[in-house]
Every structure is written in C-alpha cells, then in structure tokens.
C-alpha cells in the first residue's frame, strides 16, 4: 500500500495486522504487508509472510509435489500406448517415457492392417513387429522396460479390444499434424472409434511443429 497522509507507516502496518488477526482467528494465515513510498519502504510479515520465493528456494517442495502427482495418476497402473514408428509416434513415446511414473506398466501396440491395394509391405505383421521392437528399444534407452503387442485387423477396433482384454486403465494415442490447423472434429476413423468405444480414459497428443506430419497405413 502507499503511505498515508495522516498516519505513520508503522501505524498502517499495525492497523492492517490487527485486522488480519481478527479475520483469521487463532491461527493467522501467512501475509506480507508493505508500505511503499517515495522515501519509505516498510514491511511486516505475519506467520512467515507470503512472499514470492527466491529462485531455487521452492525446488525441493516442487519436486516432491511432482513426484506425488506422477505416482498418483488417479488410479492408472497399466497403460496402452499406440505406436507405429512414425516421427510423431516416436516423439510421443519419448514424451510419455520422460514423465510417466516408473511404477506404471506400459505396453506398446502396433496394428498390422490389411492393404487391399498391395502398396504396403509384403508382410504387414512382420513389419509391425519390427517397428514396435524399435519402440521397445527406444524405451529401454530411456531407462524404461515396456512390453509390446502386435495384432492384425482394424487399428481402432484392435486397440479397444486389447484395452478390454488387458484391463488397461488408459490409452495413449498420437494425432497427426493436421489437428494443429484447428479442425479437431475431423478425427481419423480409428481415433474416433477408440474415443467412442474405449473402456478407459483416452489421452490424445500431437507433436511440436518441428516434427512433420507423416502418413501410415494404420493411422494411429
């Protein structure tokens, strides 16, 4: 507050402090009172004061809170991560592995879809297996041990079925770069199917602008 033309700065502090103690009762909440003028800067801290912490001062407490949040995850103990080996999917894997609590079990899943036009690999299942194994290796480089599953069929349906059979608590899926343009209503059919039929929560994410959009056969 600014200085009063009638009262001394100390009187202003006393008046506000008395009011605050009356409001809070027997256990006052932290409060910092400051009278700042052209030639005066007087401060009174109640119950330790309420000040912006100095850089690094709150680091241990922040770290503890972050650890608690990561550990809790609102009941998630098993997570299914859709992985197709694209740059976007690989970036998403790095992101998830970096912040997810190590106690949460992660399974990577890739779906080998039939290619009626025969423009894809000769053996989609073998290709999907190689892709997901690279994801497992990447997770290992990040210090995480994950399991994996390769299935054949329609991506959306197979992801949902695996979530049901495996009793997963959450599904992670990456989105293509098109969603950065703001049209989040035009989900790919596989994404929409998972959103509408998943037995658990679904977390969707997309990569930063530095990662170009890529198209894969399964679209997960």
Image: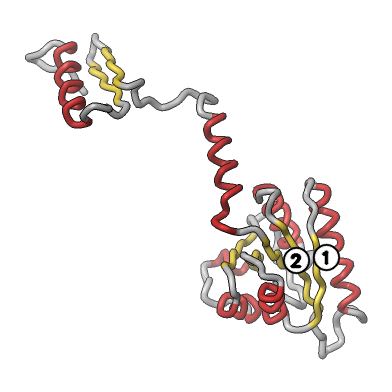
Label 1 sits on a secondary structure element that is: helix
In this picture, is 69 found above or below 4? below
Q: Nearer the viewer, residue 187 or 102?
A: 102
In this picture, is 116 found above or below 9? below
Q: Label 2, label 1: how many angstroms apart (C-alpha)?
A: 7 Å
Residue 173 in which image quadrant: bottom right
Label 2 sits on a secondary structure element that is: loop
Residue 172, numbered label: none
Q: Position of residue 106 (x, y in %)?
A: 72, 59
Q: Residue at x 80, y 70 (%)?
A: 149
Callouts 2 and 1 close, C-beta under 8 Å: yes
Q: Position of residue 68 (x, y in %)?
A: 56, 43
In this picture, is 15 found above or below 220? above
Q: Position of residue 144 (x, y in %)?
A: 78, 50
The answer to whether residue 12 is left or right of residue 187 is left
Q: Which residue is mark 2?
A: 83
Structural crowding at the residue carrying mark 1, measured as other residues with C-alpha within 10 Å and reported as few (<14), some (14–19) or many (≥20): many
């Amino acid at each position: 507050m600014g200085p009063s033309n009638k009262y001394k700065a100390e009187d202003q502090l006393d008046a506000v402090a008395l009011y605050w103690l009356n409001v809070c009762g027997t256990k006052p909440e932290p409060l910092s009172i400051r009278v700042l003028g052209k030639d005066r800067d007087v401060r009174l801290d109640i119950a330790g004061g309420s000040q912006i912490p100095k850089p690094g001062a709150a680091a241990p407490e922040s770290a503890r809170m972050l650890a608690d949040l990561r550990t809790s995850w609102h009941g998630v103990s098993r997570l299914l991560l859709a992985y197709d080996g694209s740059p976007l999917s690989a970036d998403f894997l790095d992101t998830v592995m970096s912040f997810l609590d190590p106690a949460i079990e992660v399974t990577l899943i890739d779906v080998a879809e039939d290619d009626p036009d025969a423009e894809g690999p000769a053996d989609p299942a073998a290709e999907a297996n190689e892709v997901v194994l690279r994801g497992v290796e990447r997770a290992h480089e990040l210090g995480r041990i994950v399991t994996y599953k390769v299935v054949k069929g329609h991506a959306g349906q197979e992801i949902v079925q695996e979530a049901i059979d495996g009793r997963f608590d959450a599904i992670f899926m990456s989105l293509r770069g098109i969603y950065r343009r703001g049209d989040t209503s035009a989900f790919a059919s596989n994404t929409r199917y998972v959103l509408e039929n998943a037995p658990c929560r679904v977390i969707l994410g997309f990569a930063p602008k530095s990662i170009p959009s890529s198209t894969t056969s399964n679209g997960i």
